[in-house]
Amino acid sequence: MRIDPVIVLVEELKASYTALARARQAEDWGSAQRELTKQAATQAELRETEPTSVIGAAYLLREAAAELLASQADADVATSNVRLREAAARMEQGVRQLADLVWLRQFHRALAGGWYGRVGEEVAPLVAMSLKGAARPLLLYRAACPPRVAGVARATSETCAMRIIRDVS
């Protein structure tokens, strides 16, 4: 399974932030300019990358919340921002709740519909991409069968999990 591309981009941003801080501390303005350019390119790529996991979706939700909060100080925006950050915090832990997904769909419709102005329309694609990442089905393995011994056929009605438990005890 491949790693979520959003997580890769986030790690690149973190490394770039560290490199920028070092360049500024050393007063290496050429390196600082290159890091700022790299950060801008990575941020632009991040806005176009669809997450493939709940954790990647959480990062995009945090980005959307930061942009909304920085743009307006309306009470409705503040309330939505708190709810957005709470959903992102749960998703960062790998927890998907149906209530969060339903609320995010409604919030996306409000953003795209212009309820939060121009900034809301700019943030709407981030919320839409995070919804796609958060709503992806998870692949779970219920049990694993031990390898069969060559030439021995088992004619039992035991499941793989039952055989594993029996062999361990």
Image (spheres, grey):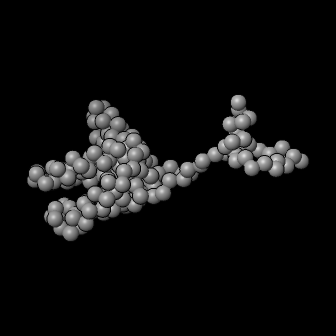
Q: Quadrant of residue 165?
A: top right
Q: Is residue 16 left or right of residue 69?
A: right
Position in image of residue 32 (x %, y %): 30, 42
Residue at point 70% right, 39% down?
164
Location of residue 101 in the rendering, given as x and y in whole percent from the top left corner: 34, 57
Please tell me which residue is depicted at 41% across the width and 58% down the height of the picture.
Answer: 135
Which residue is at a point 32% across and 47% down the rendered structure image?
Answer: 88
Instruction: Answer yes or no: is residue 9 visible.
Output: no
Q: Nearer the viewer, residue 117 or 14?
A: 117
State the image coordinates of residue 45 (x, y, percent, origin top left).
Answer: 37, 57
Q: Nearer the viewer, residue 10 or 145?
A: 145
Which residue, as the protein is rendered here, is positioned at the far right? 151
- Above or below — where is 157 with respect to 123? above
Question: Is 52 displayed left or right of 39 in the figure?
Answer: right
Which residue is at the far front? 157
The answer to which of 15 and 85 lies nearer the viewer is 85
Q: Residue at x 28, y 45 (%)?
A: 86
Where residue 124 sits, quadrant-wise, is bottom left
- Rendered location of residue 18, percent (x, y): 35, 37
Would residue 81 be visible to someone looking at this image? yes
